[in-house]
Image: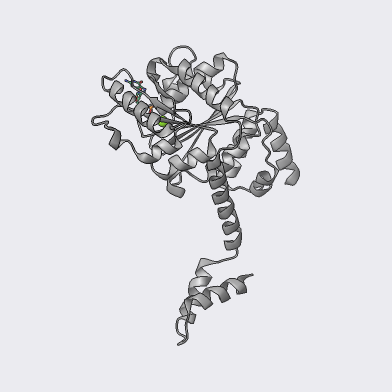
Amino acid sequence: MQDNIKQLLTHIQTGDILSLAKGITLLENELPGYESLLLQLQDTHHARVIGITGPPGAGKSTLVNALLHYWLKQNKKIAVIAVDPSSPFNYGALLGDRIRMSDFYTHPNVFIRSLASRGNLGGLSSKIIEITDLVKNAPFDYILIETVGVGQSEVDIAGLADCTIVTLVPEAGDEVQTIKAGIMEIADIFVVNKADRDSAEALFRNLRILSHEKAGTDAETPVIKTIATSREGIDELASAVHEFLARHTELPTKRMHLLAEKCWQLIQAKRMKNIDPQKLKTELSKALLQPAFNIYSFAKQFEESQG
Ligand SMILES: Nc1nc2c(ncn2[C@@H]2O[C@H](COP(=O)(O)OP(=O)(O)O)[C@@H](O)[C@H]2O)c(=O)[nH]1
Ligand SMILES: [Mg+2]
């Protein structure tokens, strides 16, 4: 088993896509060898992780597709991980004329995987951390992670990514107040997508103002207009990403929070491994009959008795 896992990882590190897919499945389903694989992971290729978040329908997948076109032309190797429970992954359908779906899926420089969000941890599956860590073992330049921005997941993605792109679209009533405060904290770059719509200019201006107010003496968060469907503004977006990554080579502070949380969960999972919920209930129902029942001392004793 140990040898098999080692071999699998070696194949992943040398760029074997099938092995990578296999490794992800192993992690996703916690199949035998799962722990062993996790324990052997290394950040061998130093891929930069780019998070793309935003509300459903904002055009995140279309943007990812456009960025893929852009970076493939520069001979970059890219992995895409999409965590989107709402829409089936259909980059193929979005590819348009230049690279047809079949070419794209088998393009040697692209790896695409979509993950079902399991609904835990406020949307962003905690598995995404493990899977990203695995993908970092494969020879990619960029790992793009698309997540639907709803509450907590936005914060998580900011911890996971080296650069977080928040995608917004012009809607009715784009006053500054309606832009969620939290979003300013996590965005490294703002994209105003669907710039072909009339109201895009207002959203763009408002974001510029917010970004300026927040920045103080720091660099302002870039705000970039795109029309993802016709790949307009993609050069500018890619430049903003490159610039941001060049300026931020150290670990993002948000990474610490994410990793501390992950560590906490790992320890908790390990500690809880021997706890049988059914047995807990049986013992508890017995203990409840004692006149001197105390839930705290019961929990303590139960835990100690389970070793
Ligand atoms: N008009 C317009 N439509 C767009 C643009 N970008 C994406 N769309 C469309 O918006 C819809 C949602 O796009 P999608 O990429 O699936 O959004 P996601 O849910 O954020 O991944 C699709 O029908 C796209 O074709 C754009 O710049 N302009
Ligand atoms: Mg999508």
Write the residue at 54% across / 47% down: 257
- x, y percent for residue 278: 50, 69
Which is nearer the eye, 174 or 290?
174
Residue at the extreme right of the image, as rendered: 3
57 vs 175, left or right, is right
In this figure, which colouring scheme has been used for the structure? one colour
Q: Quadrant of residue 133?
A: top right
Left or right position of 241 against 225: right
- Report x, y in % for residue 300: 56, 74
Q: Position of residue 250 (x, y in %)?
A: 61, 34
Nearer-the-camera pick, 161 or 202: 202
Q: Depth check: give the residue in front, 18 or 39.
A: 39
Judge whether residue 58 can be spotted in this image.
Answer: no
Residue at 57%, 20% in the rendered image? 107
* Image position, residue 214 (x, y; %): 40, 34
Farthest residue to the top: give it.
Answer: 98
Residue 154 visible in image:
yes
Extreme residue in the left direction: 172
Would you place residue 69 above or below residue 168 in this image?
Answer: above
Question: Which image quadrant: the C terminus?
Answer: bottom right
Residue pictured at 26% horizontal, 22% vertical: 199
Q: Residue at x 46, y 25 (%)?
A: 64
Furthest-front residue in this view: 217
Q: How many labels were placed on the picture?
A: 0
| Ligand 2 position by quadrant | top left
